[in-house]
Each structure stands twice: as C-alpha cells, then as structure tokens.
Image: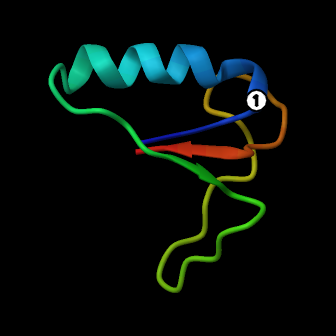
Amino acid sequence: MYCVCKQHIETALDEFLNEYEDAAPDLVNLKETEFSDWDPPLKCAHCEEPAEVLVV
C-alpha cells in the first residue's frame, strides 16, 4: 500500500507490481474517500507533496 502524490503514481505502481507480481493494484483518490479506522498520511511516500492517491 502506497500513499503518493500524482507525480509519483507511476513509481508506486512499479513498486506494487514488483512486490505483488500477479496482482493488479487499485487506485483510490484520497480526496474523495473517507476511512473509518485509518487516517492516510498527509505527505507522499516519495516527497513532501500532499498524498492524493492510495495504491493498494
């Protein structure tokens, strides 16, 4: 699972595919989705920009 900015979506997709070889990831817009038991990170996993997409 990766929380990233739009600039790093491709990097997160590559990392996901390297880790879970046969699974296709889902992309979740963090601005449009609320989670009852989890607060997503505010910053991208690869830079200081706001996290906008969850790759899971």
Q: Residue at x 84, y 33 (%)?
A: 49
Q: Residue at x 39, y 17 (%)?
A: 15
Look at the numbered disc 1 and give the secondary structure of its residue: helix
Quarter of the figure that contains the N terminus: top left
What x and y, as percent, mark residue 3? 58, 42
Left or right for 7, reference 41: right
Quarter of the figure that contains the C terminus: top left
Quadrant in which residue 7 is drawn: top right
Q: Residue at x 15, y 24 (%)?
A: 22
In the displayed orientation, state which residue is furthest to the left: 22
Label 1 packing within 10 angstroms: few (<14), some (14-19), many (20+): few
In the displayed orientation, state which residue is furthest to the bottom: 36
Depicted 13 relative to depicted 2: above or below: above
What residue would you read off at disc 1? 6
Depicted 27 relative to depicted 40: above or below: above
Quadrant in which residue 45 is drawn: top right
What x and y, as percent, mark residue 44? 70, 35
What x and y, as percent, mark residue 19? 23, 21
Depicted 40 relative to depicted 25: above or below: below
Left or right for 27, reference 7: left
What x and y, as percent, mark residue 8? 67, 20
Q: Residue at x 76, y 29 (%)?
A: 6
Disc count in the image? Answer: 1
Depicted 17 relative to depicted 33: above or below: above
> Which amino acid, by three-letter code, is at mark 1?
Lys
Left or right for 22, reference 1: left
